[in-house]
Amino acid sequence: MKIYLIILKLILFPYILICQNIIGNDLKKELLETNDDVFIPIIIKIQDDFDVVELKKEFINNNTPIKKRASIICEEMQKIARNTQKPVLESIKKNENEYKNLKSTWIINSIFLEVKKNLIQTIVNTPNINLIQLNNTQSDIIDYIETTVPSKRSFSTTEPGIEAINVRPLWNMGYTGEGLLVFNYDTGVWPQHPAFSDRFFANFYPMNQCWDGYFSDTPNGHVSDHGTHTLGTMAGLVEASNDTIGIAFKSYWIANDFVTSSVATLPPIEDMITSFEWALNPDGNTSTDYDVPDVINNSWRWYNEIDTFQCSGYVVDLMNVIEAAGIANIFSAGNNGPDNDGVRSPQRINTNLVNTFCVGSVNGNDENYPISNFSCRGPTQCPGDGSLSIYPEVVAPGQNVRSAWGEDDFNTISGTSMASPHVSGAVLLLKEAFPFLSGQEILLALYNTATDLGEEGEDNTFGMGLIDVYAAFNYLTEFYDPVDPNSIETDIILLNIENVPKEISCESTFTPIIKVLNNTDSILNELKIYYKDYLNNSEDSMVTEINLNPGDDTEIEFQTIENENFGNKEIGFQIKTLNDIVEDDYHNNRKMIRYNYKPTLNLPFIEDFQNGISDQYWHINNDDYYRTWDTISTGGIINNNLSTYVNLYGYNPRAEQKDELISPNLNLSGDSIKLEFHVAYQKYNNSSKQDTLKIFLSTDCGESFNYKIFEKGGEDLSTYSETTDNFIPTNDNQWRQETISLNEFSNEEIMLKFVTINLRGNNIFLDNIIVDNYMNSDSDLNEKLNISILPNPSNGVFQLRCNHFIKNISIHNNLGQIIMEKMELNKIINTQILNLQNQTNGFYIITIETKDDLKRFKIIKNKF
């Protein structure tokens, strides 16, 4: 073995020597120890002349407006990344079997991928390469400390930790964070929580501009309630009870779900980086800046060894970009206690006094504000003298903090994760007073005016001390004039939109009613109402005359809107005066509505899932945001290699999760309607409770599913008796066809809902769902007409043979749409060619109309 290693090193030595200035030391070691066929995770740092620190100086010298800085950075850095990464990406993509998981970022001008080592030499010889490093960074799981200390306060007052940082004087002046925007970089948020539901930015703008989902496209807190708790401290207020759990309780918020509580589900580092890219330009339009957050709260960290790793390099570059964009970037210090074994990255970065502004925890319920025993201490491992070596920057209340929890609950927990949102909320109040200042300038004010605790002066336990928001405000007034929060009393508010589609809609049109409040001091005579359908990228507007006195509201009927395209709809409305006015709030004159527009299809309806689960026709309800309906390769059904299923094997069973697959609306014309489908399942254990499949039927476009037409579970559902781990059907004896009569719903419109109930047994599969009028079967048709279709299955060319008078032949696809029609044949047919070569593979229904009857049967197009 030693001889082999010596020979290997001799072979690789010239290669490593040539690359020694480009390949990082960790990667050099990995190259010596890794086989040729192993994929190595690397980061390629691209060479460019961009200097974000110099750009920040230009912003300051030119007094560039804060909100414009992010747009300038985005445009400049995206252009540079496109040009400098192009030759590198082209070189990599020529070797498609040598790499995987390629992702590029512009915010640090780098390329992330996994690569076989033979390709590294090619990359090294490509222009614009600055450094190639081993990618051994990953995010760390979030942690917090459950508390058993009961809350002793009235829920109609303010949290003691909030009082401890002295925000009440700013509240009394009228500062509430109104109009400001925070990005909660955390585990996700339950957006319906009453403490902040009305200020989710997605109430006013498209979802993809307000929620950067890694685990789910739908905003939620299923990963952990941690993110809901941190947001509550920044922005929470339950107005009905005056329960003030937050600091900037009129601020807006956006969020992501990139932080986890499980090592197994940690996102890759490159995805966490690109979420910062998203934050600099959420709507993808650099000409707008309303969507750029004022504060990013980071109650998380990356996991790295405790050394000087990431004291320079791409992570420092990333944090410098956020600071140059004028955003306050705030981090929790960590919960590893006083032994200085927990200063992680990026918290340990010390580019300047407030870059990656780190916050330790004190007990805000104790008037002496003692340090929390879990609060991480310094010094930082990154090189630096004086204040640059001290860690954390400041402290804030993080012990026994009560805030939002779940969809509508509250919880008291502890951690530095609870401390940093106090600082983020404080920044929002100060930014409302001084909107022309950068995040760095606001953080310096908090840093320089903190109340000293512990040993005299700045120290590695309390940093500069406990933040004092009012002291920071007074400090800034020595240099700047604050904006009066009551200086503008003009606001037009879109209160509500009524007469809109329900969550599921089958209606082709609707006429919305817009409810408007005149919160100005003048009579409104005219308004312009804008409308945009984001799914179709279509828009329209109308001008309406009104006579609306100050303080009054009115309802305006908008023009009738025609639904186009099926699927998940997002429609935005905005109201404006014809002559622009300066408003208190430019967001609350907007509203979004969302619903699923379902098609109504005629029979026959056939679904074989060969093209996946179409979101134009089907939709999925997945209340636990975990495993749900998907498609997978199976065997056993002729000419059909994809089926839909729910992976129940190993699915955590505590909540008996239900996953729902909802069909299009179906018009059941005829007198003998049946539902047919294939099912496959193998009972896995002998528990008294078993996985179950249920089918419900709706006659009101999905508003209610009052009819249960099928239910089987366990042994009754099983189609195969041999116990199989993670069962996937492979042959025809593992499937069973079920048939259900729908005669009682004839000539009605119905919707089907297939529901799996999970008891952690085995996977449930469905395929070949057919709803049709079965008055005449295939065998009847064949017997009466002496008909044959050859070949069947076919690659697309079918020959219809019979000796009978045929009036008409038509062919429907699996959505009930006519794709071929031979109208008015009105003759005896001996042979008729039916060409489906331009159609997709799958099932089709041929309808043959004779003088006396209408006959249907199935054919299969397959690729041979």
Image (cartoon, rainbow, N blue to C red):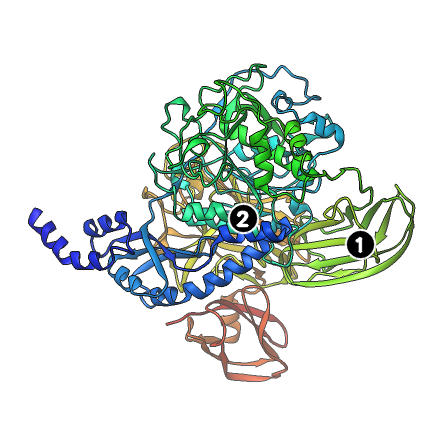
Crowd band around label 2 with a 10 angstrom C-alpha radius: few (<14), some (14–19), many (20+) = many
Residue with the mark numbered 1: 576
Compared to residue 635, the image places residue 161 above or below, namely above
**In terms of image quadrants, where is residue 408?**
top right
Under circle 1, the secondary element is strand
Front residue of 570/779: it is: 570
The image position of residue 289, as x and y in percent, is 64, 53
Crowd band around label 1 with a 10 angstrom C-alpha radius: few (<14), some (14–19), many (20+) = some
Does residue 282 show up?
no
Q: CA distance from mark 1 to mark 2?
A: 33 Å
Q: Residue at x 68, y 58 (%)?
A: 747
Residue with the mark numbered 2: 324
Does residue 155 show up?
yes
The kind of residue on which mark 2 rests is Ala
Q: Is residue 137 left or right of residue 219?
A: left
The image position of residue 681, as x and y in percent, is 41, 46
**In terms of image quadrants, where is residue 670?**
bottom right
Circle nearer the viewer, 1 or 2: 2
The image position of residue 326, as x and y in percent, is 58, 46
Front residue of 353/135: it is: 353
**In terms of image quadrants, where is residue 558?**
bottom right
Compared to residue 75, the image places residue 726 above or below, namely above
Q: Residue at x 68, y 37 (%)?
A: 177
For marks 1 and 2 on the same chain, the one whose residue lies earlier in the sequence:
2
Q: Residue at x 41, y 49 (%)?
A: 314
Under circle 2, the secondary element is helix
Front residue of 505/455: it is: 455
The kind of residue on which mark 1 rests is Lys
Front residue of 164/822: it is: 164
Identify the mark at residue 80; answer none if there is no mark.
none
- In which quadrant is the C terminus drawn? bottom left
Q: Is residue 146 left or right of residue 5?
A: right
